[in-house]
Image (cartoon, coloured by chain):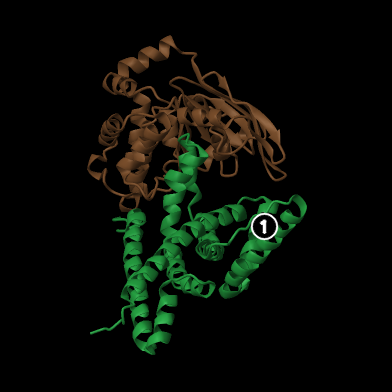
Chain colours: A green, B brown
């Protein structure tokens, strides 16, 4: 039987951190992705430039570097800011960058850039006639997006989205370097203490596999939902 | 609103013929000197049209004459670069922006579009909704009709266009003719003042055209006001109250079907009709 040397509970808590981190990052990433896609499709040159800058920067720099930059670099920035405020106004404050918040924001920001491209392609693949028909009925812009554009877009975006989600879930392991006790960090500590890296890494690998398989199942159901109109081609 | 349609459906003939005499001059849609350019190319050079209740106006002309563009200007799917538009006595205001002319008030445009329904060449039923969902969508979310009333109305409309059995099908599971009849039901669900048809049979296999034309003909019988763009000349001659022949972005000739088809006065129209 698998002997976790009493690390079971801590590993379980670490797994919860991983899941929370991943889900919250996904929300941020989807928001940034939608914003990036809209900016790139808006026809506004300034917005387009800003979005292009964002995606180029994020996609061109390693995730690990970005993570350290945001966490350690961000802390340095906040520290010098608080020093400056103290020197000028005599007000003393100290902000500690929470590693969890830093992790969510960094991962969300990274994957927002990738999802921007996914969403852009998906929005463009929505047939013009579908949107025109909605406009012709007197629908407002927001209603058109909610009832027609978004659901149609989702059927195109889901494959890319599920791919991004899987990579995102695994990228959360990076937060262990900024001191968050996620599953990987707990397992690393346990391996060092017990000299049984094989046991703990195998365990952690299996948990990731279960999580990705489970989300694969959810995405399959979502694909079915948003693909409703496409299953069963025309009879004649 | 639904009641009006039901009344029309039950007593359509008497009501239609009566109302045509009594409110002969009720203008539902009026377009004045509509102009439109694509880049530097003028495609509409000042076209005017007045649709009174019960009118069935057909726009004919060779491809590139601007008839579809003009039709799309009537519910502002295309923004006209010049001219005025009036729906049910309400003028649509325009303002000049950096990107050209645009409607002054989006809300006003949305209201106007809910009164002027459009049937497209490629049907454009929403792919992610069943036929029934397609039909109740706008009445519920744009007009604010209650769900039960919208569904009740939708079922009666599907019955009417011969698709009662297909209500749970997705557009991809329907033939072109069925999709187009569904699209007509979707337009009718808004109980519009005016219906626009943009080449409703051009994308259909020949054997499916008849069913769609039969549905449109039944709309004439209940006194609906319609503006059509079509290449079906025989049908145009049968149903229209007025025919407009467009050539190179201008109205070349207007008249009753018997005038246009029987005694065309311009040489261009004669030539256009002879090639059919």
Q: Is residue B265 visible?
A: no
In the picture, the quarter occupied by the C terminus of chain A is bottom left
Q: Is residue B60 above or below residue A221?
A: above
Say left or right for B40 vs B231. Answer: right
Q: In what element is the residue under mark 1?
A: helix
Say left or right for A192 vs B86. Answer: left
**Residue B250, image quadrant:** top right
Considering every residue shown, the one lying at the far right of the view is A88
Q: Is residue B138 or residue A8 the one in the foreground?
A: A8
Q: Is residue B108 above or below residue A194?
A: above
**Residue B270, image quadrant:** top right
Q: Which residue is mark 1?
A: A50
Chain of residue at mark 1: A
Q: Is residue A42 visible?
A: yes
The residue that appears at 33% across and 80% down in the rendered structure is A203
Q: Position of residue A152 (x, y in %)?
A: 43, 52
Q: Is residue A13 above or below residue B58?
A: below
Density class for disc 1 (Cα within 10 Å; few <14, some 14-19, many ≥20) is some
Q: Position of residue B112 (x, y in %)?
A: 51, 28
In the picture, the quarter occupied by the N terminus of chain A is bottom left
Considering every residue shown, the one lying at the far top of the view is B22
The residue that appears at 57% across and 70% down in the rendered structure is A67
Q: How many marks?
A: 1
Say left or right for A52 vs B173. Answer: right
Q: Is residue A35 above or below residue A19?
A: above
Q: Position of residue B149 (x, y in %)?
A: 29, 29
Q: Position of residue A62 (x, y in %)?
A: 59, 75
Q: Is residue B45 or residue B97 the one in the foreground?
A: B97
């Amino acid at each position: 039987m698998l002997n976790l040397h009493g690390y079971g509970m801590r590993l379980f808590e670490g797994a919860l951190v991983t899941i929370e981190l991943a889900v919250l990052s996904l929300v941020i990433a989807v928001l940034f992705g939608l914003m990036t896609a809209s900016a790139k499709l808006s026809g506004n040159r300034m917005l387009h430039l800003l979005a292009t800058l964002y995606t180029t920067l994020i996609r061109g720099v390693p995730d690990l570097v970005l993570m350290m930059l945001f966490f350690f670099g961000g802390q340095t920035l906040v520290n010098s800011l608080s020093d400056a405020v103290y020197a000028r106004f005599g007000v003393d404050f100290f902000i500690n960058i929470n590693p969890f918040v830093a992790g969510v924001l960094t991962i969300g920001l990274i994957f927002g850039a990738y999802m921007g491209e996914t969403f852009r392609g998906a929005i463009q693949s929505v047939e013009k006639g579908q949107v025109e028909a909605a406009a012709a009925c007197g629908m407002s812009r927001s209603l058109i997006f909610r009832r027609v554009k978004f659901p149609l877009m989702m059927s195109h975006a889901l494959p890319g989205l599920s791919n991004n989600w899987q990579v995102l879930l695994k990228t959360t392991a990076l937060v262990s370097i900024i001191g968050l006790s996620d599953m990987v960090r707990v397992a690393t500590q346990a391996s060092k203490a017990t000299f049984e890296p094989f046991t703990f890494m195998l365990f952690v690998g299996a948990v990731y596999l279960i999580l990705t398989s489970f989300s694969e199942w959810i995405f399959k159901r979502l694909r079915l939902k948003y693909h409703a109109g496409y299953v069963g081609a025309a009879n004649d | 609103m639904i009641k009006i349609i039901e009344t029309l459906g039950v007593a359509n003939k008497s009501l239609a013929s009566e109302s045509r005499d009594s409110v002969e001059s009720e203008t539902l849609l009026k377009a004045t000197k509509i102009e439109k350019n694509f880049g530097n190319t003028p495609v509409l050079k000042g076209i005017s049209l007045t649709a009174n209740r019960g009118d069935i106006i057909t726009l004919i002309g060779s491809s590139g004459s601007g008839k579809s563009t003009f039709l799309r200007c009537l519910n502002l799917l295309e923004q006209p670069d010049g001219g005025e538009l009036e729906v049910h006595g309400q003028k649509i205001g325009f303002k000049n922006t950096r990107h050209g002319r645009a409607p002054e008030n989006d809300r006003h445009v949305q209201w106007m579009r809910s009164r002027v329904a459009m049937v497209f060449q490629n049907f454009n039923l929403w792919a992610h909704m069943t036929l029934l969902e397609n039909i109740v969508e706008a009445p519920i979310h744009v007009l604010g009709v209650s769900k039960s009333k919208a569904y009740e109305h939708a079922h009666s409309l599907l019955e009417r266009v011969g698709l009662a059995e297909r209500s749970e099908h997705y557009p991809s599971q329907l033939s072109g003719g069925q999709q187009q009849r569904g699209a007509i039901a979707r337009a009718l669900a808004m109980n519009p003042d005016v219906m626009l048809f943009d080449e409703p049979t051009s994308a259909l296999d020949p054997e499916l055209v008849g069913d769609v034309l039969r549905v449109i003909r039944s709309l004439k019988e209940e006194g609906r006001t319609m503006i059509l763009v079509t290449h079906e000349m025989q049908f145009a001659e049968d149903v229209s109250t007025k025919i407009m022949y467009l050539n190179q972005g201008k109205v070349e000739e207007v008249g009753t079907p018997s005038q246009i088809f029987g005694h065309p006065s311009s040489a261009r129209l004669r030539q256009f009709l002879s090639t059919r």
